[in-house]
Image: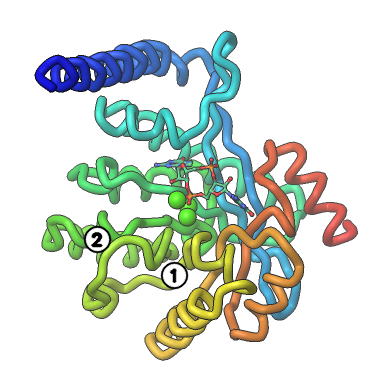
Protein backbone atom coordinates (compact mmCIF):
# COMPACT_ATOMS: atom_id res chain seq x y z
CA UNK A 1 0.00 0.00 0.00
CA UNK A 2 2.92 2.23 0.83
CA UNK A 3 4.43 1.74 -2.64
CA UNK A 4 1.10 2.38 -4.33
CA UNK A 5 0.75 5.56 -2.34
CA UNK A 6 4.15 6.71 -3.37
CA UNK A 7 3.45 5.85 -7.00
CA UNK A 8 0.20 7.76 -6.89
CA UNK A 9 2.03 10.70 -5.42
CA UNK A 10 4.72 10.50 -8.07
CA UNK A 11 2.06 10.26 -10.77
CA UNK A 12 0.41 13.48 -9.64
CA UNK A 13 3.79 15.06 -9.21
CA UNK A 14 4.80 14.20 -12.76
CA UNK A 15 1.46 15.25 -14.21
CA UNK A 16 1.72 18.57 -12.40
CA UNK A 17 5.29 18.97 -13.53
CA UNK A 18 4.34 18.29 -17.15
CA UNK A 19 1.55 20.84 -16.91
CA UNK A 20 3.92 23.39 -15.44
CA UNK A 21 6.46 22.84 -18.22
CA UNK A 22 3.75 23.18 -20.87
CA UNK A 23 2.43 26.38 -19.30
CA UNK A 24 5.92 27.83 -19.06
CA UNK A 25 6.52 26.92 -22.69
CA UNK A 26 3.25 28.52 -23.83
CA UNK A 27 4.05 31.61 -21.78
CA UNK A 28 7.46 32.01 -23.45
CA UNK A 29 5.78 31.78 -26.88
CA UNK A 30 2.97 34.13 -25.87
CA UNK A 31 5.41 36.85 -24.78
CA UNK A 32 6.22 37.91 -28.32
CA UNK A 33 2.90 36.97 -29.91
CA UNK A 34 1.54 40.51 -29.99
CA UNK A 35 4.70 41.95 -31.61
CA UNK A 36 4.82 39.08 -34.12
CA UNK A 37 1.17 39.79 -35.06
CA UNK A 38 0.07 36.26 -34.18
CA UNK A 39 -3.04 37.51 -32.36
CA UNK A 40 -6.25 38.13 -34.30
CA UNK A 41 -9.83 38.98 -33.48
CA UNK A 42 -12.75 36.96 -34.76
CA UNK A 43 -16.27 38.38 -34.65
CA UNK A 44 -19.51 36.55 -33.92
CA UNK A 45 -22.83 38.27 -34.67
CA UNK A 46 -25.50 38.89 -32.05
CA UNK A 47 -29.07 38.84 -33.32
CA UNK A 48 -32.26 40.53 -32.12
CA UNK A 49 -34.59 37.53 -31.72
CA UNK A 50 -37.70 39.56 -32.49
CA UNK A 51 -36.59 41.58 -35.53
CA UNK A 52 -33.81 39.30 -36.80
CA UNK A 53 -31.47 42.30 -37.04
CA UNK A 54 -27.76 42.10 -36.29
CA UNK A 55 -27.38 44.27 -33.20
CA UNK A 56 -23.88 43.39 -32.13
CA UNK A 57 -20.70 41.41 -32.60
CA UNK A 58 -18.56 39.78 -29.92
CA UNK A 59 -14.82 40.07 -30.47
CA UNK A 60 -13.07 36.78 -29.63
CA UNK A 61 -9.31 36.51 -29.59
CA UNK A 62 -7.39 33.93 -31.64
CA UNK A 63 -3.73 32.99 -31.41
CA UNK A 64 -2.24 31.54 -34.54
CA UNK A 65 1.22 30.23 -33.73
CA UNK A 66 3.44 29.18 -36.68
CA UNK A 67 4.23 25.78 -35.12
CA UNK A 68 1.49 25.16 -32.57
CA UNK A 69 -1.31 26.18 -34.94
CA UNK A 70 -4.40 27.80 -33.44
CA UNK A 71 -4.22 27.91 -29.64
CA UNK A 72 -7.64 28.21 -27.97
CA UNK A 73 -8.20 31.22 -25.70
CA UNK A 74 -9.39 28.78 -23.03
CA UNK A 75 -5.75 27.57 -22.96
CA UNK A 76 -3.79 30.80 -23.21
CA UNK A 77 -5.99 33.44 -21.52
CA UNK A 78 -5.45 31.92 -18.03
CA UNK A 79 -1.68 31.96 -18.66
CA UNK A 80 -1.88 35.55 -19.88
CA UNK A 81 -3.82 36.48 -16.74
CA UNK A 82 -1.38 34.79 -14.37
CA UNK A 83 1.63 36.44 -16.00
CA UNK A 84 0.13 39.90 -16.43
CA UNK A 85 0.45 39.62 -20.22
CA UNK A 86 -3.33 40.02 -20.36
CA UNK A 87 -2.82 43.75 -19.80
CA UNK A 88 -1.07 44.54 -23.11
CA UNK A 89 -3.09 41.82 -24.88
CA UNK A 90 -6.42 43.05 -23.47
CA UNK A 91 -5.48 46.59 -24.34
CA UNK A 92 -4.77 45.57 -27.91
CA UNK A 93 -8.12 43.70 -28.09
CA UNK A 94 -10.01 46.80 -26.97
CA UNK A 95 -8.24 49.16 -29.37
CA UNK A 96 -8.47 46.76 -32.31
CA UNK A 97 -12.18 46.05 -31.72
CA UNK A 98 -12.95 49.80 -31.52
CA UNK A 99 -10.88 50.54 -34.63
CA UNK A 100 -12.58 47.76 -36.61
CA UNK A 101 -16.10 48.73 -35.51
CA UNK A 102 -15.48 52.35 -36.52
CA UNK A 103 -14.00 51.26 -39.88
CA UNK A 104 -17.16 49.19 -40.57
CA UNK A 105 -19.37 52.17 -39.72
CA UNK A 106 -17.31 54.43 -41.97
CA UNK A 107 -17.65 51.84 -44.75
CA UNK A 108 -21.43 52.25 -44.54
CA UNK A 109 -22.31 49.05 -42.70
CA UNK A 110 -25.21 49.28 -40.26
CA UNK A 111 -24.31 50.46 -36.76
CA UNK A 112 -23.94 47.73 -34.19
CA UNK A 113 -22.31 47.30 -30.81
CA UNK A 114 -18.94 45.59 -30.54
CA UNK A 115 -18.59 43.50 -27.36
CA UNK A 116 -15.18 42.96 -25.78
CA UNK A 117 -14.32 40.36 -23.11
CA UNK A 118 -12.57 41.68 -20.03
CA UNK A 119 -10.35 39.96 -17.53
CA UNK A 120 -10.52 40.86 -13.83
CA UNK A 121 -6.81 41.68 -13.99
CA UNK A 122 -7.42 44.50 -16.51
CA UNK A 123 -10.45 45.73 -14.65
CA UNK A 124 -8.53 46.20 -11.39
CA UNK A 125 -5.83 48.41 -12.92
CA UNK A 126 -6.09 51.93 -11.51
CA UNK A 127 -5.97 53.51 -14.98
CA UNK A 128 -8.40 51.06 -16.60
CA UNK A 129 -11.17 53.61 -17.29
CA UNK A 130 -8.66 55.96 -18.87
CA UNK A 131 -7.47 53.12 -21.11
CA UNK A 132 -11.04 52.56 -22.28
CA UNK A 133 -11.63 56.28 -22.75
CA UNK A 134 -8.42 56.53 -24.83
CA UNK A 135 -9.44 53.57 -27.01
CA UNK A 136 -12.74 55.32 -27.73
CA UNK A 137 -11.18 58.72 -28.42
CA UNK A 138 -8.37 57.36 -30.60
CA UNK A 139 -10.73 55.21 -32.69
CA UNK A 140 -13.50 57.78 -32.89
CA UNK A 141 -16.04 55.08 -32.01
CA UNK A 142 -19.12 56.37 -30.25
CA UNK A 143 -19.20 55.02 -26.63
CA UNK A 144 -22.68 53.55 -27.03
CA UNK A 145 -21.23 51.22 -29.69
CA UNK A 146 -18.85 49.59 -27.21
CA UNK A 147 -19.93 46.89 -24.77
CA UNK A 148 -17.72 45.37 -22.10
CA UNK A 149 -18.44 41.81 -20.97
CA UNK A 150 -17.77 41.31 -17.27
CA UNK A 151 -17.98 38.12 -15.26
CA UNK A 152 -19.88 37.58 -12.04
CA UNK A 153 -16.70 36.69 -10.13
CA UNK A 154 -15.13 39.98 -11.23
CA UNK A 155 -18.06 41.89 -9.74
CA UNK A 156 -18.10 39.93 -6.49
CA UNK A 157 -14.46 40.15 -5.48
CA UNK A 158 -13.28 43.39 -3.95
CA UNK A 159 -16.67 44.95 -4.54
CA UNK A 160 -15.74 48.47 -3.39
CA UNK A 161 -13.15 49.38 -5.99
CA UNK A 162 -15.24 47.53 -8.55
CA UNK A 163 -18.34 49.59 -7.83
CA UNK A 164 -16.42 52.80 -8.49
CA UNK A 165 -14.93 51.44 -11.73
CA UNK A 166 -18.36 50.32 -12.96
CA UNK A 167 -19.71 53.81 -12.26
CA UNK A 168 -16.87 55.45 -14.17
CA UNK A 169 -17.33 53.10 -17.12
CA UNK A 170 -21.08 53.79 -17.26
CA UNK A 171 -20.30 57.50 -17.12
CA UNK A 172 -18.30 57.07 -20.34
CA UNK A 173 -21.59 56.05 -21.96
CA UNK A 174 -20.77 52.48 -22.89
CA UNK A 175 -22.74 49.25 -22.33
CA UNK A 176 -21.98 46.60 -19.73
CA UNK A 177 -23.04 42.98 -19.79
CA UNK A 178 -22.52 40.02 -17.46
CA UNK A 179 -21.01 37.04 -19.25
CA UNK A 180 -21.76 33.38 -18.47
CA UNK A 181 -24.65 34.53 -16.30
CA UNK A 182 -25.93 31.87 -13.92
CA UNK A 183 -22.69 29.93 -13.55
CA UNK A 184 -20.88 32.10 -11.04
CA UNK A 185 -22.39 33.33 -7.85
CA UNK A 186 -25.45 32.22 -5.94
CA UNK A 187 -26.46 35.64 -4.64
CA UNK A 188 -28.08 38.05 -7.07
CA UNK A 189 -27.76 41.01 -4.72
CA UNK A 190 -24.94 42.47 -6.78
CA UNK A 191 -27.35 43.07 -9.69
CA UNK A 192 -28.93 45.82 -7.62
CA UNK A 193 -25.59 47.51 -6.96
CA UNK A 194 -24.11 47.49 -10.43
CA UNK A 195 -25.61 49.44 -13.27
CA UNK A 196 -25.29 46.81 -15.99
CA UNK A 197 -27.36 46.66 -19.18
CA UNK A 198 -27.53 43.02 -20.17
CA UNK A 199 -27.22 39.44 -18.92
CA UNK A 200 -25.62 36.85 -21.18
CA UNK A 201 -27.34 33.57 -20.34
CA UNK A 202 -24.68 30.86 -20.23
CA UNK A 203 -24.57 28.25 -23.00
CA UNK A 204 -24.97 25.41 -20.50
CA UNK A 205 -28.58 26.46 -19.80
CA UNK A 206 -29.34 27.18 -23.44
CA UNK A 207 -27.94 23.92 -24.78
CA UNK A 208 -30.42 21.54 -23.15
CA UNK A 209 -33.42 23.84 -22.95
CA UNK A 210 -35.46 21.77 -25.40
CA UNK A 211 -34.74 18.45 -23.66
CA UNK A 212 -34.73 19.54 -20.05
CA UNK A 213 -37.66 21.35 -18.46
CA UNK A 214 -35.44 22.61 -15.61
CA UNK A 215 -33.07 24.41 -17.99
CA UNK A 216 -36.01 26.02 -19.80
CA UNK A 217 -37.46 27.09 -16.43
CA UNK A 218 -34.11 28.64 -15.48
CA UNK A 219 -33.86 30.54 -18.74
CA UNK A 220 -37.40 31.85 -18.29
CA UNK A 221 -36.65 32.87 -14.70
CA UNK A 222 -33.49 34.74 -15.79
CA UNK A 223 -35.35 36.55 -18.60
CA UNK A 224 -38.18 37.59 -16.30
CA UNK A 225 -35.87 38.74 -13.54
CA UNK A 226 -33.71 40.68 -16.01
CA UNK A 227 -36.74 42.40 -17.52
CA UNK A 228 -38.15 43.33 -14.14
CA UNK A 229 -34.79 44.96 -13.35
CA UNK A 230 -34.80 46.76 -16.70
CA UNK A 231 -32.02 44.58 -18.17
CA UNK A 232 -31.84 42.88 -21.56
CA UNK A 233 -30.96 39.24 -22.07
CA UNK A 234 -28.88 37.49 -24.69
CA UNK A 235 -28.60 33.71 -24.97
CA UNK A 236 -25.22 32.26 -25.93
CA UNK A 237 -24.49 28.97 -27.66
CA UNK A 238 -27.66 28.88 -29.77
CA UNK A 239 -26.86 26.07 -32.19
CA UNK A 240 -30.27 25.24 -33.69
CA UNK A 241 -33.34 27.00 -35.01
CA UNK A 242 -35.63 25.24 -32.52
CA UNK A 243 -33.58 26.75 -29.68
CA UNK A 244 -33.93 30.21 -31.22
CA UNK A 245 -37.69 29.63 -31.47
CA UNK A 246 -37.91 28.45 -27.86
CA UNK A 247 -35.92 31.46 -26.67
CA UNK A 248 -38.19 33.76 -28.66
CA UNK A 249 -41.24 32.25 -26.98
CA UNK A 250 -39.62 32.83 -23.56
CA UNK A 251 -39.19 36.49 -24.58
CA UNK A 252 -35.38 36.41 -24.54
CA UNK A 253 -34.22 39.53 -26.40
CA UNK A 254 -31.12 38.46 -28.30
CA UNK A 255 -29.12 35.41 -29.30
CA UNK A 256 -25.67 34.41 -30.42
CA UNK A 257 -24.44 31.03 -31.62
CA UNK A 258 -23.47 28.69 -34.45
CA UNK A 259 -27.07 28.62 -35.71
CA UNK A 260 -26.61 32.22 -36.86
CA UNK A 261 -22.87 32.22 -37.51
CA UNK A 262 -19.57 31.07 -36.06
CA UNK A 263 -16.96 33.59 -34.98
CA UNK A 264 -15.27 34.77 -38.20
CA UNK A 265 -12.19 36.78 -39.19
CA UNK A 266 -13.03 40.45 -39.79
CA UNK A 267 -13.11 40.12 -43.59
CA UNK A 268 -15.47 37.13 -43.52
CA UNK A 269 -17.68 38.84 -40.94
CA UNK A 270 -18.01 41.88 -43.17
CA UNK A 271 -18.92 39.67 -46.14
CA UNK A 272 -21.46 37.77 -44.05
CA UNK A 273 -22.99 41.03 -42.84
CA UNK A 274 -23.24 42.56 -46.31
CA UNK A 275 -24.97 39.40 -47.45
CA UNK A 276 -27.43 39.40 -44.53
CA UNK A 277 -28.42 43.04 -44.87
CA UNK A 278 -28.23 42.78 -48.70
CA UNK A 279 -26.09 45.90 -49.14
P1 LIG B 1 -17.01 33.34 -23.81
O1 LIG B 1 -16.79 34.81 -23.63
O2 LIG B 1 -18.09 32.72 -23.01
O3 LIG B 1 -17.24 33.16 -25.37
C1 LIG B 1 -18.15 32.25 -25.94
C2 LIG B 1 -17.45 31.04 -26.49
O4 LIG B 1 -18.43 30.17 -27.06
C3 LIG B 1 -16.47 31.35 -27.62
O5 LIG B 1 -15.38 30.42 -27.51
C4 LIG B 1 -17.30 31.07 -28.86
O6 LIG B 1 -16.53 30.77 -30.00
C5 LIG B 1 -18.11 29.89 -28.40
N1 LIG B 1 -19.40 29.75 -29.12
C6 LIG B 1 -20.11 30.68 -29.77
N2 LIG B 1 -21.25 30.16 -30.26
C7 LIG B 1 -21.27 28.87 -29.91
C8 LIG B 1 -22.22 27.79 -30.12
O7 LIG B 1 -23.27 27.93 -30.75
N3 LIG B 1 -21.87 26.58 -29.59
C9 LIG B 1 -20.72 26.38 -28.89
N4 LIG B 1 -20.48 25.16 -28.42
N5 LIG B 1 -19.82 27.37 -28.67
C10 LIG B 1 -20.10 28.60 -29.17
P2 LIG B 1 -13.87 30.89 -27.71
O8 LIG B 1 -13.83 31.88 -28.82
O9 LIG B 1 -13.04 29.66 -27.81
O10 LIG B 1 -13.54 31.65 -26.37
C11 LIG B 1 -13.47 30.98 -25.15
C12 LIG B 1 -13.36 31.94 -24.00
O11 LIG B 1 -12.12 32.65 -24.03
C13 LIG B 1 -14.43 33.04 -24.00
O12 LIG B 1 -15.64 32.53 -23.49
C14 LIG B 1 -13.78 34.08 -23.10
O13 LIG B 1 -13.98 33.76 -21.76
C15 LIG B 1 -12.31 33.92 -23.45
N6 LIG B 1 -11.90 34.99 -24.39
C16 LIG B 1 -12.02 35.03 -25.73
N7 LIG B 1 -11.53 36.19 -26.23
C17 LIG B 1 -11.10 36.92 -25.15
C18 LIG B 1 -10.49 38.22 -25.00
O14 LIG B 1 -10.27 38.98 -25.95
N8 LIG B 1 -10.21 38.60 -23.71
C19 LIG B 1 -10.46 37.80 -22.63
N9 LIG B 1 -10.13 38.24 -21.40
N10 LIG B 1 -11.03 36.59 -22.75
C20 LIG B 1 -11.35 36.15 -23.98
CA1 LIG C 1 -17.96 36.59 -23.73
CA1 LIG D 1 -19.99 33.50 -22.27
CA1 LIG E 1 -17.33 31.20 -21.02
The quarter in which the N terminus is drawn is top left
The kind of secondary structure element at disc 1 is strand
Q: Earlier in the sequence, mark 1 or mark 2?
A: 2
Give the x, y percent position of residue 94. 45, 42
Name the residue at 41% across, 90% down.
228
Image location of residue 269, percent across then percent down? 73, 45
The residue pinned by badge 1 equals: 199
Mark 1: few/some/many CA within 10 Å (<14, 14-19, 20+):
many
Picture quarter with the C terminus: bottom right
Q: For this rendering, which residue is in front, 249 or 91?
A: 249
- The numbered disc on residue 243 is none
- Residue under the image location 47 percent in, 49 percent down: 116
The answer as to whether callout 2 falls within 8 Å of ligand 2 is no
Q: Residue at x 77, y 40 (%)?
A: 268
Front residue of 90 and 64 = 64
**Mark pair 1, 2: CA separation:** 13 Å
Distance from mark 1 CB to nearest ligand 3 atom below 8 Å: no
Left or right, residue 196 beside residue 58: left
Q: Residue at x 56, y 54 (%)?
A: 114
Q: Position of residue 153 (x, y in %)?
A: 26, 56
The image shows residue 110, relative to residue 254, as above or below, that is above
- Residue 245 percent location from the top left of the image: 72, 77
Q: Relative to residue 209, is residue 230 depicted above or below? A: below
Q: Secondary structure at mark 2?
A: helix
Q: Residue furthest front?
A: 1
Q: Which residue bears the numbered disc 2? A: 155
Amino acid sequence: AKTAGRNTFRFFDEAMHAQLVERRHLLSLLRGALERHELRLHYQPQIDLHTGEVIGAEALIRWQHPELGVVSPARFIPIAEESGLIVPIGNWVMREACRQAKAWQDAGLPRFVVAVNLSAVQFRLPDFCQTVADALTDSGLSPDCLELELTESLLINDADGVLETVRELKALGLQLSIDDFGTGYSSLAYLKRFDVDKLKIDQSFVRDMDRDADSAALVLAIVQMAHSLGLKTIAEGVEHEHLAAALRSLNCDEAQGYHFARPMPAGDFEGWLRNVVAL
